[in-house]
């Protein structure tokens, strides 16, 4: 009898534990898998809708043209050009080759970038070429260039668009972002935002 009672109690105990585990798992699935994501999404949409939706940028027609967080390749010489990207700005493949300064592939790429710069910008001496225009960022997705890298492109863009140099210089100044909190990082220019502003200026 004692053995039977012990077995029955053990069976009841195991069943009770199993039910408790199922209940607890269900509660955590609902809380962590449904309630928390929905609450986080709703809060983000209320407090920072632009960032929550990918910091997307639109043109004057309301069409999404990209994200201010991810660079793009601009092939039109009448637009400002961004940094070199060894991954063609593919966000799903963030990263770079991490080539050393003596790597043959990197040296060849740099030579080609310099040669292209000379061809497209004959008015600007190579010694004035900012290094960020011929180097890859760590992620390969950097949407920014330095203000100096934007300014050296002004002569080319002015010649191709007919927009006066002083107006383009003012455009660069207007689109220059300062240091974060006034202390961290460097002044920078978002190339996509700058080109959107340039497109608006070209229509006037």
Image: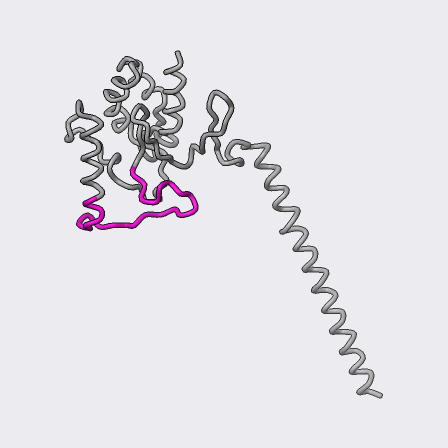
Residue at screen point 63% across, 43% down: 38
Within the image, what quadrant is residue 82 found in? top left
Residue at screen point 74% across, 73% down: 14
What's the colour scheme?
Answer: one colour
State how many labels appear. 0
Q: Which residues are magenta?
A: 84-108
Residue 13 is left or right of residue 169, and the answer is right
Residue 172 is left or right of residue 9, and the answer is left
Seen from the viewer's position, the closer of residues 12 and 101 is 101
Is 46 included in the stretch rendered in magenta? no
Place of residue 18 in the rendered image (x, y in percent of width and height, measured from the top left)? 72, 68
Residue at screen point 73% across, 64% down: 20
Place of residue 86 in the rendered image (x, y in percent of width and height, measured from the top left)? 31, 44
In the image, residue 204 sits, relative to residue 98, either above or below, namely: above
> For the stretch drawn in magenta, what is the main secondary structure?
loop
Seen from the viewer's position, the closer of residues 104 and 24 is 104
Residue 184 is left or right of residue 99, and the answer is right
Within the image, what quadrant is residue 24 found in? bottom right
Residue 167 is left or right of residue 57, and the answer is left
Quadrant of the image containing the N terminus: bottom right
Is 106 included in the stretch rendered in magenta? yes
Place of residue 11 in the rendered image (x, y in percent of width and height, measured from the top left)? 77, 77
Residue farthest right in this picture: 1
Within the image, what quadrant is residue 192 found in? top left
Residue at screen point 31% across, 30% down: 81
Residue farthest top in this picture: 204
Place of residue 96 in the rendered image (x, y in percent of width and height, measured from the top left)? 32, 47
Quadrant of the image containing the C terminus: top left
């Amino acid at each position: 009898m004692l053995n039977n009672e012990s077995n029955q109690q053990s069976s009841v105990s195991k069943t009770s534990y199993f039910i408790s585990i199922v209940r607890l798992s269900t509660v955590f699935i609902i809380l962590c898998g449904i309630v928390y994501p929905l609450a986080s999404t709703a809060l983000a949409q209320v407090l920072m809708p632009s960032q929550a939706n990918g910091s997307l940028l639109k043109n004057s027609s309301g069409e999404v043209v990209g994200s201010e967080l991810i660079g793009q390749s601009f092939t039109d010489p009448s637009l400002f050009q961004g940094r070199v990207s060894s991954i063609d700005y593919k966000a799903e493949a963030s990263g770079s080759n991490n080539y050393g300064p003596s790597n043959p592939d990197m040296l060849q790429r740099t030579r080609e970038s310099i040669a292209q710069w000379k061809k497209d910008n004959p008015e600007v001496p190579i010694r004035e070429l900012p290094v960020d225009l011929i180097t890859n960022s760590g992620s390969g997705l950097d949407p920014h260039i330095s203000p100096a890298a934007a300014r050296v492109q002004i002569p080319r863009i002015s010649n191709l668009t007919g927009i006066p140099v002083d107006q383009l210089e003012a455009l660069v100044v207007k689109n220059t972002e300062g240091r974060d909190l006034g202390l961290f990082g460097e002044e920078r220019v978002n190339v996509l935002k700058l080109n959107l502003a340039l497109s608006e200026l070209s229509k006037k």
